[in-house]
Image (tube, grey):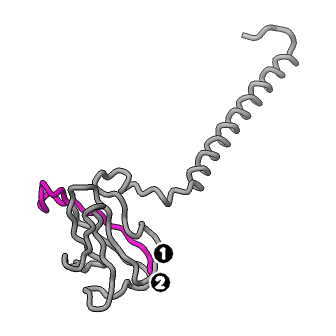
Amino acid sequence: MYLAIGSGHTEKVRNFNLLRRLLLGAAALVGIAAILLALFLADTDDIDVTISGNAAVDALIPPRNAEVLSQETVGVDLATGYDARLALNGVNIPPEQVRHMPNINRFTFRPDEGKVIERLQAERNCVEVTYWPLAAGPEQADTISWCFNAS
């Protein structure tokens, strides 16, 4: 129901409502675009969801998608009370070639002459760590895998 002030006034009200709807719609689209742009441009390289959501794994060595040299050390930092086995590019690393630093519970392997792997592959390398709580044993093992590039 319109107040009969004149047809010009009713037309102005309709135009104003249309303009208001268009501006609100445009503002909503700009807001959504800004949020998507922020998510797209956010630097999340330092956040590894598989680590931040995993109480057993403190750090991957080297980090996921890192660029490293061909003799780089690979491994994992685990929470206290866990044991681990390493595999690099599908090759199981013998336990005697894995360096374990019990004070920080770090398990590492450094490719070198005479070892099961003498150097990292050029380009993509992948690590798989099988880890388990010492109290539960390997029957309760989980795995975490990641890849990085070597030059």
State the image coordinates of residue 51 (x, y, percent, origin top left).
36, 56
Q: In this view of the protein, which residue sits in the foreground, 126 or 24?
A: 126
Q: Nearer the viewer, residue 32 or 91?
A: 91
Which residue is found at the position 42% from the left and 84% from the top? 70
Furthest residue in direction bottom, as rendered: 114
Q: Considering only order in the chain, which callout, 1 or 2, is on the residue closer to the N terminus?
A: 1
Q: Residue furthest front?
A: 103
Mark 2: few/some/many CA within 10 Å (<14, 14-19, 20+): few
Q: Which disc number belongs to residue 67?
A: 1
Give SS at disc 1. strand
- The disc labelled 2 sits on which kind of residue? Ser
Q: SS class of the residue under badge 2?
A: loop
Q: Residues within 10 Å of mark 1 (few under 14, many from 20)?
A: some
Residue found 79% across the figure and 25% down from its top: 16
Label annotation for residue 80:
none
The three-letter amino acid code for the residue at tag 1 is Glu
Assess whether residue 143 is covered by the magenta stretch. yes
Residues in magenta, as a range: 132-151
CA gap between label 2 and label 1 equals: 7 Å
Q: Is residue 149 magenta?
A: yes
In the picture provided, is 83 more to the left or to the right than 119? left
Name the residue that disc number 2 marks: 151
Q: Is residue 61 above or below residue 47?
A: below
Q: Quadrant of residue 124?
A: bottom left
